[in-house]
Image (cartoon, coloured by chain):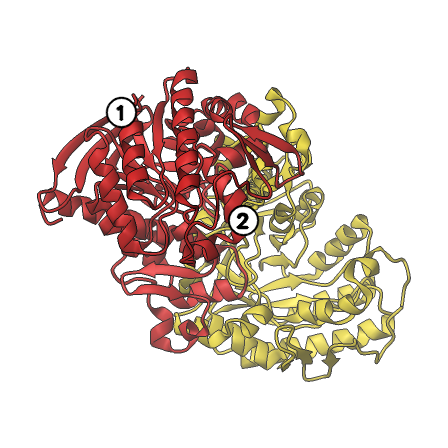
Chain colours: A yellow, B red
């Protein structure tokens, strides 16, 4: 179970400073939640992740169900012991895969987000590789073509075996540009599943309900009111928000206004550095995102000077450039001990320590950013 | 410069217990030297390597000359600063590439070693991709096809820019199954180059001469006598030894008998766990080998139970098997914190931390093995 205590509410925005107490320790909020999809933050050992100021991780139920399977994790005494992570953990519900392996895949996630076409998905329409019913979703395993069924009962059962501190209700993460009628129908299912999840859960894990509703104000508010009225321990906000960042922040404000004030709010899968401050100001307490780890594996460093593509030979071009650290304002292990030149050398020589160093720095950069935001809320600056 | 002190000589064998003092610290010998080809131990940060009981590393001059180039390394203040490794360092001379990119490549290194055909390479014969002259070797860059020339002068100049504590003389590492006349001619070149290296070196780095001679007793003894008579700070033993392990140990004994007793002896590129004890007993003080790091990247763990292929699903097959550590007799960070099941999961899920954990454990296993051997020499058991 968790306890959530709000230490301070901002007077200038809806930002809140808080402490989320879980059985594996405390999380100072607002907090960034790095993603450990397959029970591992890509490129980093648990020992390294601890040094990036990371307070909590989120693992992926769908992936772990497929590989290695929850039986193996349960046999180890749960995810904490399996992956040697002693701090708090979340697992998602698998609901995002309904989107990413469904309509997201059919249309190309980015193409959908960039498209302005509304209502391209009609009520009753099914994605190519999934079948969505009122009981749950039939998946085809990307590993071996095996047929899988995931519904609210199955998701909770798997998440109970995985033993994270915080688990999520199973939802349909709908495509953002579906028509209103599709989204209304989808929301009905997600709301029914939310109640099932609450009913079937036996463990003492904290359960978060998920608010959906696509890009429609009426549906988002309806969902926040309904999910917010149920006895969840916290709330997740899911779904795609379209291509305008301002729209997302607006929607977050609508929803957060409807959600109970004393319970924690988690934003699922969003966290571009440019958005972090607005997300916090809208009243979000935690958010997860693959951005810092994913971009690191493509050679990108997030720094106080902005994004740097460290694969470029410019970083090996002159005595001055070569010897600079990734970020002169960063105090992480990488910035204290390694140069831009060395990191670029590693990336260009295909050494795994190249992306490893960028992953480390990027996580530290994100966590540090949140630490500064917490300080600013405490000081009344935000 | 280095100082080498023999603390104890075995009465049962030619093994010696010693201390090699370099400007970046002391190395207790006999010692294993992990390979950091491109100024990085593959899969591990310098911080991690330190925790594997590693005392000294060897980097590859040829690779670093190509990428990032010695200018970049020199600009950083040498390899130690570039790669954040504060303990002693060696660089090889590039001589092994004369073999690996030359005849080794033409015939397939393993095929040559496994073949029993003697004298397949005749005096005057040239490999396909290299041209070996009395001044040095013309290479073609594997990166961009650029023509490169490496001779004793060039090798020392590059190694001086890299600033390792111990550097090696440029040699021709000849194919093991070349005919006697080829090897005799090659040895003449290597011996002339050894003198050139001594003459051109300006730095205070320790310089090791390299003994060659293929599989012929007369040539090996001739080379050890000649190289041993020159004012080197230590000696490397290079070359391929054919396919019989007994032959290698025999040859090492011939050579070590001829080399000055008070100077350190390094065996280049050899170090299978089965051979380590015999190599030490022959009188070798240090040896480098890619085996523990290379095999780790292919899923292999070296343990007190022997070699384990951790990619096999057997390690995810039952409650008891899954939860065991890699090696119950190992006290490394990986064995103390992670299970066989988790490591197999990481390898099968293509997470980089899988090979990273195996690299860490394998290096610890090798270094631990040497620590025990040193203890046994001290106790008079070896």
**Which of the 4 image quarters holds residue A219?**
bottom right
Which chain is home to disc 2? B
Q: Residues within 10 Å of mark 1 (few under 14, many from 20)?
A: few
Residue B220's place in the image compared with B71, above or below, is: below
Image coordinates of residue B248 in percent, x first then y, are 29, 49
Q: Residues within 10 Å of mark 2 (few under 14, many from 20)?
A: some
Above or below, comparing residue A78 to residue B70 in the picture: below
Determine the secondary structure under disc 2: helix
The answer to whether B191 is drawn above or below residue A194 in the figure is above
Q: Is residue B297 left or right of residue B363?
A: right
In which quadrant will I find the C terminus of chain A?
A: top right
Identify which residue is drawn at 63% across, 70% down: A94
The residue shown at (76%, 57%) is A254
Residue A325 appears in view: no
Place of residue A350 in the rendered image (x, y in percent of width and height, measured from the top left)? 58, 45
How many marks can you see?
2
Image quadrant of residue A116? bottom right
Q: Residue at x 55, y 74 (%)?
A: A65
User: Foreground residue, B23 or B139?
Assistant: B139
Q: Nearer the viewer, residue A276 or B16?
A: B16
What residue sits right under mark 1 in the picture? B229
Residue A235 position within the rendered picture, expressed as x and y whole percent measured from the top left:
62, 63
Per the model, the C-alpha gap separating discs 2 and 1 is: 33 Å
Q: Are marks 2 and 1 on the same chain?
A: yes
- Secondary structure under the numbered disc 1 in the rendered image: helix
Mark 2 or mark 1, earlier in chain = 2
Confirm whether residue B379 shows in the render.
yes
In this view of the protein, which residue sits in the foreground, A20 or A82?
Answer: A82
Label of residue B105 in the image: 2
């Amino acid at each position: 179970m968790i306890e959530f205590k709000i230490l301070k509410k901002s007077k200038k925005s809806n930002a809140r400073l808080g402490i989320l107490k879980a059985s594996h320790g405390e999380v100072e909020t607002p907090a960034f939640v790095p993603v450990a999809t397959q029970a591992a933050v890509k490129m980093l050992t648990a020992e390294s992740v601890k040094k990036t100021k990371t307070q909590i991780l989120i693992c992926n139920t769908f992936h772990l169900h497929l590989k290695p399977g929850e039986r193996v994790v349960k046999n180890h005494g749960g995810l904490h012991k399996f992956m040697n992570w002693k701090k708090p953990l979340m697992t998602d519900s698998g609901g995002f895969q309904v989107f990413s392996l469904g309509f997201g895949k059919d249309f190309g996630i980015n193409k959908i987000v960039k498209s302005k076409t509304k209502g391209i998905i009609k009520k009753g329409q099914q994605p190519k590789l999934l079948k969505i019913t009122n009981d749950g979703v039939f998946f085809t395993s990307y590993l071996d073509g095996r047929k899988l069924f995931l519904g609210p009962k199955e998701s909770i059962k798997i998440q109970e075996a995985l033993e994270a501190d915080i688990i999520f209700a199973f939802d349909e993460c709908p495509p953002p540009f579906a028509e209103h009628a599709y989204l209304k129908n989808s929301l009905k299912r997600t709301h029914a599943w939310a109640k099932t999840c609450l009913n079937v859960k036996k463990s003492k894990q904290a359960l978060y309900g998920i608010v959906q509703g696509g890009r429609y104000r009426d549906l988002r508010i309806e969902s926040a009111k309904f999910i917010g009225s149920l006895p969840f321990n916290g709330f997740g906000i899911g779904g795609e928000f379209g291509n305008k960042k301002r729209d997302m922040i607006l929607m977050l404000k609508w929803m957060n206004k409807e959600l109970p004030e004393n319970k924690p709010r988690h934003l699922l899968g969003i966290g571009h550095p440019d958005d972090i401050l607005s997300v916090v100001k809208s009243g979000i307490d935690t958010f997860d995102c693959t951005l810092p780890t994913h971009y690191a594996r493509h050679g990108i460093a997030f720094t106080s000077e902005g994004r740097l593509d460290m694969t470029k030979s410019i970083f090996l071009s002159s005595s001055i450039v070569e010897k600079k650290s990734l970020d002169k304002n960063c105090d992480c292990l990488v910035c204290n001990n390694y140069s831009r030149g060395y990191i670029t050398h590693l990336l260009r020589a295909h050494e795994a320590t190249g992306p490893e160093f960028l992953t480390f720095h990027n996580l530290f950069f994100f966590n540090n950013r949140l630490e500064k935001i917490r300080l600013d809320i405490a000081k009344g600056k935000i």
